[in-house]
Image (cartoon, rainbow, N blue to C red):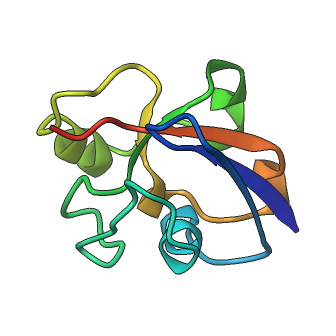
């Protein structure tokens, strides 16, 4: 079981628990503001863009080339950007904190 905290653009902290599935689906199922998952989790949009807390980057690992290509289309990308549809819930993600990215 992993506890994952989303910090919304309004600075609200929402902590959720899951044992499987994608982090994006966890957010969508629990109506986390700013996480839409329009493509259904197939890495073809950026509506689940988050910034990983810097000290938690080792929990998520590096983004794939396809994910990086999709992130390049977003104006609010930084070195901590990830698409949470590409993050699978696991015990390794327990305690993860994600800032929901601003949307233009």
Task: Say left or right for 17 vs 20.
Answer: right
Q: Give coordinates of residue 64: x percent, y percent.
A: 38, 45
- On the rendered structure, is 57 left or right of 99? right
Whole-percent x, y for residue 101 in the image: 37, 37
Residue at image location 54% in from the left, 80% down from the top: 29
Looking at the rendering, in which quadrant would you find the C terminus?
Answer: top left
Which of these two is toward me, 5 or 92?
5
Vertical comparison of 34 with 62: above or below: below
Quadrant of the rendered structure where residue 103 is?
Answer: top left
Image coords of residue 86 (percent x, y): 45, 59
| Residue drawn at x 83%, y 61% as measured from the top left | 2
Q: Is residue 86 left or right of residue 38?
A: right
The image shows residue 31, relative to residue 80, as above or below, that is below
Residue beneath the point at 36% across and 56% down: 48
The image position of residue 42, as x and y in percent, is 30, 72
Q: Nearer the viewer, residue 3 or 43?
A: 3
Q: Is residue 76 above or below residue 31?
A: above
Q: Quadrant of the N terminus?
A: bottom right
Query: Looking at this view, is 53 or 15 the one in front?
Result: 15
Residue shown at 24% from the left, 52% from the top: 46
């Amino acid at each position: 079981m992993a506890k994952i905290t989303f910090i919304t653009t309004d600075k609200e902290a929402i902590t959720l628990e899951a044992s499987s599935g994608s982090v994006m689906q966890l957010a969508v199922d629990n109506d986390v503001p700013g996480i839409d998952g329009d493509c259904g989790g197939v890495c073809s949009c950026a509506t689940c863009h988050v910034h990983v807390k810097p000290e938690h980057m080792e929990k998520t690992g590096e983004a794939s080339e396809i994910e990086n290509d999709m992130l390049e289309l977003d104006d609010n990308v930084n070195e901590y950007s990830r698409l949470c549809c590409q993050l699978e819930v696991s015990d390794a993600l327990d305690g993860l904190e994600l800032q929901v990215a601003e949307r233009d």
